[in-house]
Image: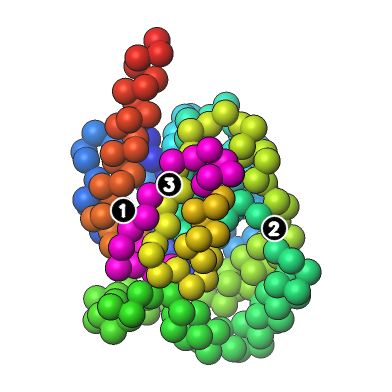
Amino acid sequence: MTLLLIPGINNTARTFAPMIAAMPETIDCTAVDCPALPDLDAIARDLLATAPARFVVAGHSFGGYVALAMLDLAPERIDGVILINSSTGADSPAVAAAREQRAQQAEAGGYAALADAASARAYHPDNAGRDDLMAERAEALRGYGAERFAAHCRACAIRPDRTERLRASGKPVLIVAADEDLVIPTEKQRDMAQHLGAEFALIARAGHMLPAEQPAALAGVVAGWLARQTAQAAAAR
């Protein structure tokens, strides 16, 4: 079983390191960085060029949008989809316009201020002051940068609604939400899972930065779901 992990905005592949360390050795985990391209399909094509022949794709937030683009482009290579603190929908015109404003602000030297504002909303109150999380966040921001932020804001703003495409894909889907997600509300993710007929998992004491905040709990949920998918596939043969 191969699991491809895609990070969100202001995050890098290293954000998944604690989660990967907690995963069973039987699951081959690879985390990747998204290139600084302003189009989700272009990002997906770039990642598919070096991805395994077959894999389960897991995307955190923006990474979920990329995962859905990969599914559109190469459904025959994807055995399942895991969305973590993410959404299948598109931006409203107002949200898309705000993203373009943030992209321009980042390009004009305001990336640090934007990143600080995002960080203030990203964590569960119990985790917001943790030294390890703040150190990880600072490292991720240095590796991510303003150019990538601007490109990914623009990619988000023009993304299509892929809800029905995912629903019709026939792929197994897992939606993992945090109990205190202020960026993509928890109940919105629960409703999305119900509409998709997907399995839903809720992890406590976490915010939008769930992979960093509760990596062991996330690993347990993902590993358990993958084990069930493997067992179901074996029983069907």
Residue on which the image places disc 1: 218
Q: Is residue 41 above or below residue 177?
A: above
The image quadrant that residue 101 belongs to is: bottom right
Spatial distance from mark 1 to mark 3, Cα to Cα?
A: 12 Å
Q: Position of residue 58 (x, y in %)?
A: 45, 47
The residue under the point 39% across, 62% down is 178
If you read the primary sequence from the N terminus, does the residue marked by circle 3 or circle 2 appear first? 2
Q: Mark 3 and mark 2: span between their CA atoms? A: 21 Å
Q: Nearer the viewer, residue 152 or 173?
A: 173
Q: Quadrant of the N terminus?
A: top left
Q: Amino acid at mark 2?
A: Ala
Image quarter hosting the C terminus: top left
Q: Which residues are magenta?
A: 193-210
35 sits to left or right of 226: right
Q: Amino acid at mark 3?
A: Phe
* Residue 14 drawn above or below residue 219: below
Q: Secondary structure at mark 3?
A: strand
Instruction: Read off the residue under disc 3.
Output: 200
Circle nearer the N terminus (1, 3): 3
Q: Could you tell me if residue 212 is visible in this image?
A: no
How far apart are the two marked residues, 2 and 1, measured between alpha carbons?
26 Å
The count of marks equals 3
Q: Which residue is mark 2?
A: 90
Q: Amino acid at mark 1?
A: Leu
